[in-house]
Amino acid sequence: MDRSDCFVQSHSFNNSSHPRSPTMDSPVHALGTCSTLSIDGIISTSIHPTMRGNVDLARGGGFSDVGSPIEGHYVDFIMRSLRLCMQVHSRRQKGITHYQSFDTTPPLTNMFSQQDNRLIFTYDAEKLWIEPWGPNALRVRSTKMAEMPSTDWALLSPPDTPKPDVSIQDDSATLVNGDIKAHVTKRGKITVYNGAGKLLLEEYSRNRRDLLDPKCSSLEVEAREFKPLIGGDYHLTARFESLDPNEKIYGMGQYQQPYLDLKGTQLELAHRNSQASVPFAVSSHGYGLLWNNPSVGTAILGKNITSFEARSTKALDYWLVAGSTPSQIVEAYANVTGKVPMMPEYGLGFWQCKLRYQTQDELLTVAREYKRRNLPIDLIVIDFFHWPLQGDWKFDTTYWPDPDAMIRELRSLNIELMVSIWPTVDRRSSNYQEMLEQGHLIRTERGVRIAMTFMGNTVHFDPTNPASRKYVWSKAQQNYFEKGIKTFWLDEAEPEYRVYDFDNYRYHLGPNIAVGNIYPLTYAQTFFEGQSLAGQSQIVNLLRCAWAGSQKYGALVWSGDIASSWSSFRNQLSAGLNMGLAGIPWWTTDIGGFHGGDPNDPAFRELFVRWFQWGAFCPVMRLHGDREPRQRPMGEKGGAACASGADNEVWSYGDEVYAICEKYMNIRETLREYTRSLMKEAHEKGAPVMRTLFYEFPSDSECWRVETQYMYGAKFLCCPVLQKGVKDIEVYLPKLDEGKWKAFQGDEVWDGGKRITVECPFDTMPIFERAGA
């Protein structure tokens, strides 16, 4: 017998004469990851090395760590088991056939403790913290670092919460905070329940840490998997059970896909042009989960498993809330991550923009024409490359000779001015050397320090550095804000890279792969804090990206450089609705799409009209795009070398389209008071402006299945026409406790809880009004 393979888990010794009992000389059978010893009169099951580590005695060594550390009590346990095997062998040789039963179960110390309101579980290198963070909500953190990181990332300081009920037993512990309860086993497995006892969340583990766990398995998959990286961080994967294959999951930010329900999808937790990772999920199961980690990674919302991955991090960190309705969940999230400011008055009407007005005269001509036609307009935009070089953050006086006079005239027309800001700094910029010397620029881990090559070799300023934020705002304040410009278009906010090599960039806060998703939040913070210190209160800035918490810095997110196509149009509806559920109530899109589209093309005019109609019922109604055919550049130096798209004003599309645009601009204007009330609700509660049907009607099961209709606030049911050539569409009218649905234009009324077919001629998008709302 090779005693090095004697692993004994449990023993029942007797003098068995069973004919199939092996003799003492029977070989040891090594079966995969386990070893089984069969001895006459003894049935010995195996210890599996992968339970807590590996045992290597066959080579004459001691204990070796393969994948995870071996706890001391397991070492003691295995050594006692080996000594037991030798005792059995010795006694058998002496003719002793009756043995005493031995208990070789490894001893467990109490791994639970309480510190103030926090439940703590420790095991080997891991520290697990569970604590209340707002009513009916928990924050869960875990690390294998020496200390738990103190960064709160998206979370604000916890609001006042009643003291939780913490109970610690020998084999488990619980923490109850209102209607949410966390249970932790002696092996560290977490399950979470609501106040009614419904299971909301269960960690996914498939191992043999706890042999009494019904999901005990030899697969050896960890719920909280920390894989060490060279340098000290970990590659983290958190796994949860998919408790219901029919569960629906929403939110998570903005992805260019048509799916509103995200169950069954895989999402990249990273920013790209037109993609914003805002990792807050709202579940039909009655919970919301914030993955509170800015690392680049992946979320898998599968039918068999749910997982969140951080490619480089120091800790697991997520926030979980229980709620009986989506509105409760979203509003609870806003309470712990922040709410938007009150939208200023000029955010309620129509915004005019194009790529790009090249001169001061061109922009003023357009503004005057809107007023001459008596069209409602609140704001006009000066797009990129109105500057000499990227990173100058000032007007090119060759083409914008008197910005002060321009701003005064626009104010006299009651039109607000927005200017574009890019975070990129050209090496030729007058600010580049100073910013380089003072550490205000992002760095590259390898290669030349260039992140973008559009119109010059550039690198981004680093808003994760407070000193860099202060520097950039000082330039914008001097050259824009002090002239009277109060709202900014913070473009390239992901930030966009020429190549998305996420592991090749480093910020003040750390490597991009570990903290990069926080970039757009700190970019918004740069201007919000500067404007606030300068005395501005109602702040809205347009950004192309966001992360969890961006809303509190006045971020109005738009969906980026998207195609001018029907499929792209369809994607934006899902993107906008999921952004609202992810806690970003201010959202907009380029009406007509960005890339392409000829105003003289009848096919594009149809798409443009349907998009424009929908835009009137978006949180902000904004016309923008890079239209065809492109205009020639006006010069060869500075911003003048950048080309411009064709005309993109509402009169650029022919008389028929113009009449429809005028109609919907006036509809938007009649909704001003109502839109203001929605903005107040977003400011005070965190409620989205555009809402899924189930947000308003959570008890109507059909509303959870409808993905191409939405509510503009609580009152208006909107049914955008998302396909070309459509003359009528089928719509679902949600059930109403009282009252009826009424046509937005006309007197026809319907009961709720039914599907109807309605006409949608070229000049009309079907809208229904909820009586009494």
Image: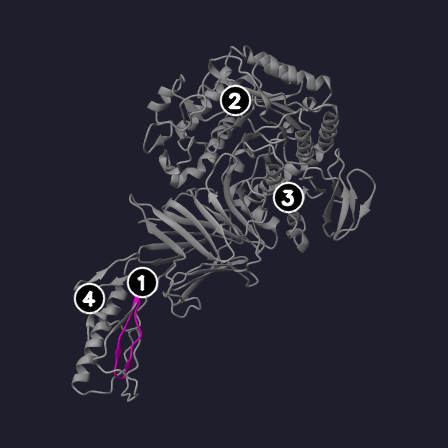
Residue at 47% across, 29% down? 526
**Image quadrant containing the N terminus:** bottom left
Q: Nearer the viewer, mark 1 or mark 3?
A: 1
Q: CA distance from mark 4 to mark 2?
A: 70 Å
Q: Which residue is mark 1?
A: 50
Q: Residues within 10 Å of mark 4 (few under 14, many from 20)?
A: few
Given residues 317 and 174, the one toward you in this image is 317
Q: Is residue 610 left or right of residue 329?
A: right
Looking at the picture, does residue 648 appear above or below residue 26?
A: above
Q: Residues within 10 Å of mark 1 (few under 14, many from 20)?
A: many
Given residues 526 and 84, the one toward you in this image is 84
Q: Is residue 276 left or right of residue 417?
A: left
Give the magenta part as a residue range.
32-49
**Quadrant position of residue 179:** bottom right
Q: Residue 658, position in %: x, y?
A: 72, 25
Which of the two discs, 4 and 1, labels the residue nearer the N terminus? 1
Q: Amino acid at mark 2?
A: Phe
Mark number for residue 58? 4
Residue at the bottom extreme, as displayed: 17
Q: CA distance from mark 3 to mark 4?
A: 64 Å
